[in-house]
Amino acid sequence: MTDADLVARIATSTGLSPAEAERVVEDVLAWYREPVEEYVRRRHASLRTYGRRNEEIYAQIAVELRDRLVAAPELSERQVRRTIYG
């Protein structure tokens, strides 16, 4: 269940209907609820698609995790690599 005040604010500020605003809020919250392990694996796969090398990817993911709106634990490059490959 989403916060009714937040949904109302989004609806008012964007011109969306309350139902659309609620869906947007739920989508954003779901994005930030993604567990760290899933985020790391998803980003690794995405960056590999664009030809990035693992060493670059590990460093980038570690930086991204520090900057996420909902704080994730700080992971070293080694921890990022172990999350991907076990």
Image (cartoon, rainbow, N blue to C red):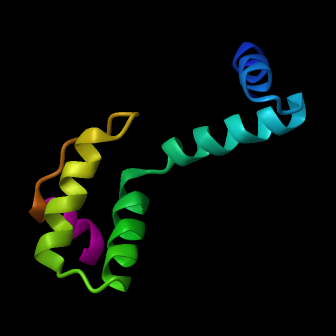
Measured as percent of width and height from the top left, residue 11 is found at 79, 25
Vertical placement of residue 12 versus 28, above or below: above
Q: Position of residue 73 (x, y in %)?
A: 25, 41
Q: Position of residue 48 (x, y in %)?
A: 31, 82
In the picture, residue 16 is in which quadrant? top right
Q: Closest to the observer: 61 or 78? A: 61
Q: How many marks?
A: 0
Q: Which residues are magenta?
A: 79-86
What residue appears at the point 87 percent right and 28 percent down from the top-left corner?
Answer: 18
Above or below 79: residue 47? below
Residue 45 is left or right of residue 27, and the answer is: left
Query: Residue 22: x, y in percent?
Result: 79, 33
Looking at the picture, tell me which residue is in the foreground, 42 or 9.
9
- Name which residue lies at 89% across and 32% down: 17
Q: Quadrant of residue 10?
A: top right
Residue that appears at 75% across and 23% down: 7
